[in-house]
Amino acid sequence: MEYSPWKKLVRSKSGLRIVLANDDCRSPFLLCEPPWTPDSESKNCTDCKSKFGLTLRRHHCRRCGRIYCGHCCSTRLPLPRMSFVDPVRMCEQCADQTSHEQDFFQRHLKVLTNGASFVSDSSLNGTDLMLCKLTPDHRYLMFDGTSQDPIDILLIKSFSVSKDVDVLDCYEDFNSGGSSMQLVFTTQEDSEKHLKLTTGPDALRKMGSSWILAMQQALKFLYNMENS
């Protein structure tokens, strides 16, 4: 499986962005730039309802594309979900949502792409380790040290975590990792499969638990995007 590392710098009306040359390798966690509300269709600020005029200018939120006054659209934040080079202007609602996403992009995605070692349920002696990691384009789970085929992250149907004897549904608890996880996913041939991974020996357990927590956050992200 090959991935294109080529990126290009593009300029849109929202600012400079670094994007992949091949859009087929686009991360599923990224957002497309929104269409901007035309100036002619907005006489008042979307938030405070102040009327635009000579002394009150219009400003577009780079995340939602709606029009606000300068006071209601004054925050500038990095927006990795749209691949902007520099911090961009956002309305208060989008700025709050973006702030909550920073931990995922700055910490959890790095944990997933670095990978962690797990024991597969197919291991004959319970000690054979496999390295599980997210590909650089964030589209597949790859497995080193096993014959397991890559898993398309968008084809994961459900995800459960076991912590000691308690099994936590991934959409109900996002505050802790676990000692094992089970994936239910669909293959490219439309067949349903299950895969259970258990954290490795003590020296690797903390890293495995952190990876499971990051995976929970990733699937929550995709679940919210699909249902938003």
Image (cartoon, rainbow, N blue to C red):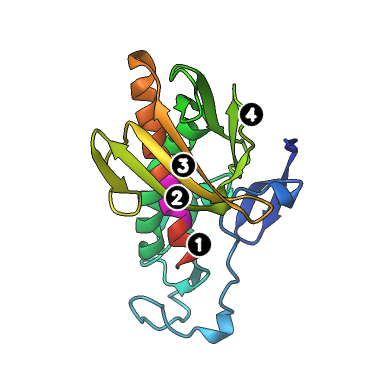
- Residue 93 percent across, percent down from the top left: 36, 64
Q: Please determine whether, in this image, residue 70 is positioned above or below residue 113.
A: below
Residue where numbered disc 3 is placed: 105
Q: Please determine whether, in this image, residue 197 is positioned above or below residue 55.
A: above
SS assignment at label 1? loop
13 in magenta: no
Q: Residue at x 73, y 51 (%)?
A: 24
Mark 1 belongs to which amino acid?
Arg
Which image quarter is the C terminus in?
bottom left
Distance from disc 3 to disc 2, alpha carbons, whole Å, reads 13 Å
Mark 3 belongs to which amino acid?
Phe
Mark 4 belongs to which amino acid?
Ser
Task: Give the quadrant of residue 85.
Answer: top right
Residue where numbered disc 2 is placed: 219
Observer-side mark, 3 or 1, equals 3
| Relative horizontal placement of residue 82, taking residue 205 as reference (left or right) | right
| Relative horizontal placement of residue 117, taking residue 191 as reference (left or right) | left
For residue 63, the mark is: 1
Q: Residues within 10 Å of mark 3 (few under 14, many from 20)?
A: some
